[in-house]
Amino acid sequence: MLRMEKMEALVGEAEAHPHPHVVVFPIPVQGHVNSMLKLSELLSLTGIHVTFLTFEHIHRRLLRFTNVTSRFARWPGFHFATIPSDLPFDHPNSGPQLMEFFDSLKITSIPPLREMLVSNRRESDVRPPVTCIIADGTLSFTIDVAQELNIPVIYFRTISACSFWAYFSIPKLVEAGELPFGGDADMDCPITCVPGMESFLRRRDLPNFLRTNNLSDRFLQFIMAETLNTTRASALILNTFEELEGPILSQIRSHCPKLYTIGPLHALLQTQIADFSPSVSSNSLWEENKSCIRWLDSKPLRSVVYVSFGSITVMTREEIMEFWHGLVNSGKWFLWVIRPDLLAGKEGEDQILTELVEGTRERGYIVGWAPQEEVLAHPAVGGFLTHSGWNSTLESICAGVPMICWPYFADQQVNSRFVSEVWKLGLDMKDTCDRWKVELMVKELMEKKMDEMLKSADKMAKLARMSVSEGGSSSCNWDKLIKDIKSMCLLQAYSHE
Ligand SMILES: O=c1ccn([C@@H]2O[C@H](COP(=O)(O)OP(=O)(O)O[C@H]3O[C@H](CO)[C@@H](O)[C@H](O)[C@H]3O)[C@@H](O)[C@H]2O)c(=O)[nH]1
């Protein structure tokens, strides 16, 4: 163990001669690529060298649909590196094919990752040696590869602290006999053994892959093992803030003491770049249809419900139609993102779109992909019907927009419970999908509960902004993380001498 004074001296020295080089490695999914690119931009701003490691098909889409080339050209230390893709971009990243996705990631990534790290150690490499890897927290093979070369790995989980903690508590749930339960079980039965969530968690609020009698299910085992592997990483970064998830963060810290909460990342980025504008900072993997902003401009204050189910959700024709009827019957304006691959299976795709677009003209506007941060910040938007993906949840929180949650899978079930029961920022309609319920909830959010919800949303938005401003919790944690990355760099240099 280094003595404190020596460590401080090292940190001082590292700050004087910083050459840290961080590899940032997300899984190839929109919500992960987006937040880890933002992290890379923030790291680049501090002068740290960054290699953003991604799959070729993701890189191609970033080049096609965003301005990353010119945006990142400002940072001479930033550089993209790619891994050949094994699966196509439209490979379903949910349901039964999910393990195929993670298996493929591992097989295709290990050799090029190792090769990249080894060749970077050669003198011929113009970039400084990699001093740290910030890996998506579901890629534990990076720890194995990095250990061979004595490079520390920091995990970045793109999910909320509350869902991370629910994943982490799976062994405890099994031990206490609260798992397994099958699909026929009473879903309203309370779950009492996740510390910090005793008073409000029900079976239906647990990640949906836990709704099984089969504890050997591969995906369940995979997520549990990957989450427990966090304790092998040098540290953990979460895109959240203390004021939002403090009590749950305390629970996590008892297992992972080196935890940096630096969120909401998109808001932190805004505070660091003087000329920041969400319209030029998109990391979208689909083409944004900006015409919806003009449509919103023509609508009254807080009158529109924004509807989006993120980048992975797939829905049946029936589900889409129930939402559509519910939205139309609510009598409210709505802006709906219907991704080209939202409909499960391709049958009737053209028909459904024509039907919806034709039938929607009166009250709504449909786009294939929206500039979401801009949409949520628009004064005409009064509510967000969301799948409760973590990025969408944080973006809604920052914009002070109350939510109706229709969680689809994984972490989203936990997030939606926290949105409704803990943070009081919205309504949770999980596990139901009928037009009557959609209409009821939209009316409730946009009429009856509007003032109350806007009040709590506004309060939380202020706390989010404070956390990323100078002296705020996330801002301070960010400074600490940078300092620690720099001292890791120096320790690396000493260990190679
Ligand atoms: O029309 C759209 C729709 C979405 N987005 C953006 O796409 C991202 C979507 O991220 P998220 O809300 O987190 O949803 P997913 O893409 O579904 O994210 C996956 O990754 C998240 C982070 O791990 C998890 O919370 C989710 O459950 C998982 O599905 C957000 O930044 C949105 O702003 C757009 O820009 N335009």
Image (tube, grey):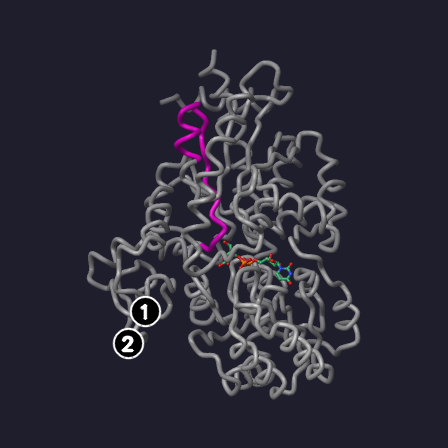
Indicate whether 55 appears above or below 181: above
Q: Amino acid at mark 1?
A: Arg
Indicate whether 76 appears above or below 291: above
Question: Picture coordinates of residue 496 (x, y %)?
Answer: 47, 14
**Residue 155 falls inside the magenta stretch:** yes
Residue at the disc numbered 1? 203
Residue at the disc numbered 2? 186
**Residue 214 falls inside the magenta stretch:** no
Question: Picture coordinates of residue 32 (x, y %)?
Answer: 54, 50
* Disc 2 element: loop
Residue 69 visible in this rendered orientation of the protein: yes
Q: Ligand 1 is found in which quarter of the picture?
A: bottom right
Instruction: Pick whichever, 287 or 190, lies toward us.
Output: 287
Residue at screen point 78% across, 67% down? 291
In-image side of 494 versus 21 (left or right): left
Residue at screen point 57% across, 26% down? 20
Q: Based on the displayed image, in which of its 4 quarters is residue 229 positioned? A: top left
* Magenta extent: 142-160
Q: Based on the displayed image, in which of its 4 quarters is residue 411 positioned? A: bottom left
Q: Amino acid at mark 2?
A: Asp
In-image side of 45 versus 161 (left or right): right
In-image side of 241 versus 220 (left or right): right
The residue most toward the front is: 347
Residue at screen point 48% across, 48% down? 238
Q: Earlier in the sequence, mark 2 or mark 1?
A: 2
Q: Are marks 2 and 1 in contact (CB under 8 Å)?
A: yes
